[in-house]
Image (cartoon, rainbow, N blue to C red):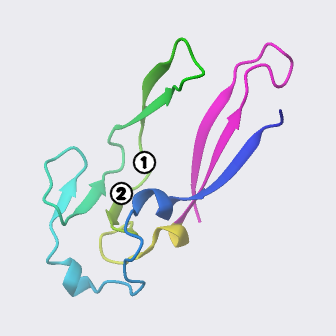
Amino acid sequence: MSKVIYPVLISAIISMSGCASLTTPSAQSLSQVPVVKFGEAAPSDHITLYPAGASLPVLTSVKGSLFEKTDESTLNVTLKKNLYVYKQWVSFDGKSWMTGNKAITGNILMTLPGEKNGQDAGTLSAEFNLK
């Protein structure tokens, strides 16, 4: 089976609000929303700050009824620059906002074990790039 590449926009990951407004929020309206660093307790309406250099855990897993043994692992990544996220909006300075898909692109890659030479490990990876 050939490898499968799924293009993914970061906005789909960071925004679960399908009916959210497409109008960029004003700096004044967002100044009323609390900024919470990743890892801190947050109210229901907040801006999440993912600070540059901070360790961000990402849980990975392979599971399902096909497997007798499943596994999971936590990877730790760090960002090169601050990232503020509010619903589908992102900012690198907390002042200028844009939809996530205008700032960041992404891909998810999956290959099966043995696909290349019958002995290689399978691959499950995510790649996110600044536009």
Q: Is disc 2 surrounded by few (<14), some (14 to 19) or many (20+) residues within 10 Å?
A: some
Query: x%, y% of residue 41?
Result: 13, 49
Residue in view at x 51 percent, y 25 percent: 63
Decide whether residue 110 is among the magenta residues. Answer: yes
| Label 2 to label 1: alpha-carbon separation | 7 Å
Front one among 18 and 121: 18
Please check the rendered image and state whether residue 20 is part of the magenta-colored stretch, yes or no. no
Front residue of 94/11: it is: 11
In this rendered view, identify the residue nearer to me: 61 or 83. 61
The x and y percentages for residue 130 are 56, 60
Where does the image place residue 24, in percent across and percent down from the top left?
38, 84
Most distant residue in the front direction:
65
Residue positioned 84% across, 15% down in the render? 118
User: Looking at the picture, does residue 129 appear above or below residue 77?
Assistant: below
Amino acid type, label 1: Leu
For residue 32, above or below residue 129: below
Q: Is residue 1 left or right of residue 88?
A: right
For the N terminus, give its image quadrant: top right
Q: Which residue is mark 1?
A: 79
Whether residue 58 sits left or right of residue 66 in the image: it is left
Horizontal side of 81 relative to 118 (left or right) equals left
Marks 2 and 1 in Cβ contact (< 8 Å): yes
According to the picture, the residue beneath numbered tag 2 turns out to be 82
Where does the magenta region start and end? 104-131
- The secondary structure type at the circle numbered 2 is loop
